[in-house]
Amino acid sequence: MQDTLAAIAREYRSKTFERSFTGWAAQVLKNRMLDYYRTRQYRRNRTADIPAEDLPNPSSEPTAELKTRLRNCLHKICKSNLRYARILVMSYQGQDLEMICSRLTMSRGNVYTTLSRARSLLEYCLETGALNP
């Protein structure tokens, strides 16, 4: 709630309002609350359904089947969105955020957003074998 009020105070002077300030501020608050609850629900659903014994051991070597599926999904992502593929590869090669920003001439926020979307697309592809839901 406090970060929302701070965002409203920050953005207040730079906005030209098509409707009243009160309506705009209420909409900002509503959107922030929806984002907060969606994120909480998403995180809870992702971790609650997986028993601990089913989680992969991070020190184990990936199987040949997983490597093949990963390669196929990366090829599909590369054909559909080259920016997603570049950011995924650079991130998994261990390049830091500043390096990715400078090499792709993107802002930090844009890299975070694009990387998040690319990871979600990769996860979906690994689960289903397709890019489109």
Image (tube, grey):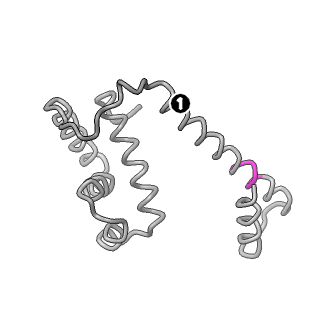
Between 89 and 1, the one lying in front of the other is: 1
Report if residue 28 lies within the magenta region: yes
Provide the residue span drawn in magenta: 27-31
In this rendering, the answer to whether 47 lies above or below 4 is above
Image quarter of the N terminus? bottom right
Q: Quadrant of residue 100?
A: bottom left
The tally of labels here is: 1
Packing grade of label 1 (10 A; few <14, some 14-19, many >=20) is: few
Residue occupying the point 63% across, 46% down: 35
Residue 23 position in % (x across, y down): 83, 55
In this rendering, the answer to whether 30 lies above or below 12 is above
Q: Amino acid at mark 1?
A: Asn
Element on which disc 1 rests: helix
By secondary structure, the bulk of the magenta-drawn segment is best described as: helix
Residue occupying the point 37% across, 46% down: 119
Q: Quadrant of residue 53?
A: top left
Q: Which residue is mark 1?
A: 45
Residue 107 position in % (x across, y down): 44, 69
Residue occupying the point 75% across, 53% down: 29
Report if residue 54 lies within the magenta region: no
Q: Quadrant of residue 66?
A: top left
Between 53 and 20, the one lying in front of the other is: 53
In this rendering, the answer to whether 75 lies above or below 26 is above
Residue 51 position in % (x across, y down): 42, 23
